[in-house]
Image: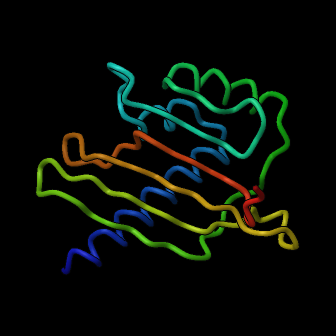
Amino acid sequence: MSDTDTASNAARQLITSYNRAFMARDLATLRSIYVEDAGGQFSYFDNHAGCDASSLDEHLQQLETFFASGEPIGGLDIEHLHPHLAGSPPEQTLVITARVRYRQHTERPTVRMTVVATQVHARWRICHMHFSDMPATL
């Protein structure tokens, strides 16, 4: 399997796992998808107000609040996926840029998503996520 295939498969599996856990509002599974946040290794920037976080605990607390009061987004469909694999095992980094669409908002523009993941014990774990609406306005 080529590096491109490996990166594409890993990216699609990671985003699918994240999406399933998010839609199920499963904080325990989401925690297992993220890196352990020792020393500020985690950051999250969202297109929903009040959801940016610079630590895993802060992010999970915001998710708990969002899940309790936020509008469900109905899932994400991947419209464009561009993964890049850097480094050599066991110290690899997976950088994913994607264009995704919220399922319940088919008429709205897509959302840009950037994910940075690192391998921990042969599993990809997310250390950075960034969502922003498209088209970006300045």
Looking at the picture, the colour scheme in use is rainbow
Give x and y (percent) for residue 132. Answer: 67, 53
The residue that appears at 49% across and 64% down in the rendered structure is 97
Quadrant for residue 48, please give it. Answer: top right
40 sits left or right of 72 in the view: left
Answer with left or right where residue 68 lies relative to residue 14: right
Looking at the rendered image, the quarter that the C terminus falls into is bottom right
Camera-side residue of 125 and 16: 125
Observer-nearest of 20 and 90: 90
Q: Which corner quadrant of the image does residue 66 belong to?
A: top right
Q: Residue 71 vs residue 66: left or right? A: right
x%, y% of residue 32?
Answer: 41, 35
**Residue closer to the observer: 84 or 120:** 84
Q: Which residue appears farthest toward the front when viewing the image?
A: 138
* Residue at image location 84% in from the left, 30% down from the top: 69
How many marks can you see?
Answer: 0
Where is residue 49 shown, x and y percent of the image? 78, 36
Report the quarter where the N terminus lies.
bottom left
What is the quadrant of residue 70 in the picture?
Answer: top right
Q: Is residue 71 above or below residue 132?
A: above
**Residue 30 vertical position relative to residue 119 in the rendered view, above or below:** above
Left or right, 67 with reference to 14: right
Q: Residue at x 49, y 73 (%)?
A: 81
* Horizontal and vertical percent position of residue 68: 79, 27
Decide: is 21 above or below 32. below
